[in-house]
Image (spheres, grey):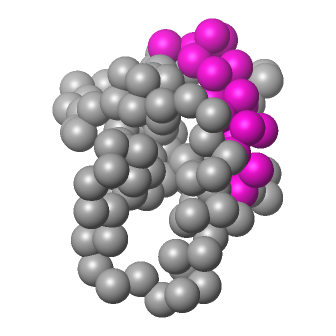
Amino acid sequence: MRNINFDKLIFLGDALTYGVDVKETIDLLHRLEEKYDCVFIKGNHEQIYFDHQNNENYQYKRFPNFLLESILHSAEQLSFILEDEFEWVNSFVMKASSFHMLIYLNIATGRI
């Protein structure tokens, strides 16, 4: 992404996918936010951590044990309120232009 100019970078959510390095992931998002005009769309994974940190029911369905373990492990690494880290939005409307490039980046692996 270093050599590409963006009008806007739209993060599609699910930053804390199971098993990621929480600090490294959030630091990367902050670096992107400093460099680009970013929109952070809240995914269901963010909502899980928002609810967990607010002592609300975070299991919108019954999670398998391995998934619950991963969520709780990541939640323990949060030394900040995730909901306050970025200006999260539920959705984003993009005006049509001559060129769009949408990329899904797996932050855990760095692969596109």
Residue 7: x, y in percent? 48, 16
46 relative to 74 in the view: left or right: left
Residue 85 vs 23, above or below: the answer is: above
Q: 54 or 66, which lies in front?
A: 54
Q: Could you tell me if residue 39 is visible in this image?
A: no
The residue at the point 35 percent across, 30 percent down is: 88
The verdict on residue 25 being magenta is yes
Q: Which residues are magenta?
A: 20-37
The residue at the point 60 percent across, 85 percent down is: 66
Q: 112 or 106, which lies in front?
A: 106
Residue 95 vs 58, above or below: the answer is: above
Q: Quadrant of the N terminus?
A: top right
Residue 97: x, y in percent? 31, 25
Q: Name the main secondary structure of what is drawn in magenta.
A: helix
Q: 85 or 79, which lies in front?
A: 79
The residue at the point 49 percent across, 24 percent down is: 85
78 relative to 53 in the view: left or right: right
15 relative to 107 in the view: left or right: left
28 relative to 51 in the view: left or right: right
Residue 51 vs 85, above or below: the answer is: below
The residue at the point 23 percent across, 39 percent down is: 91
Q: 100 or 36, which lies in front?
A: 36
Residue 82: x, y in percent? 48, 34
Q: Quadrant of the C terminus?
A: bottom right
Q: Quadrant of residue 22?
A: top right
Q: Could you tell me if residue 57 is visible in this image?
A: yes
Residue 81: x, y in percent? 48, 31
The verdict on residue 82 being magenta is no
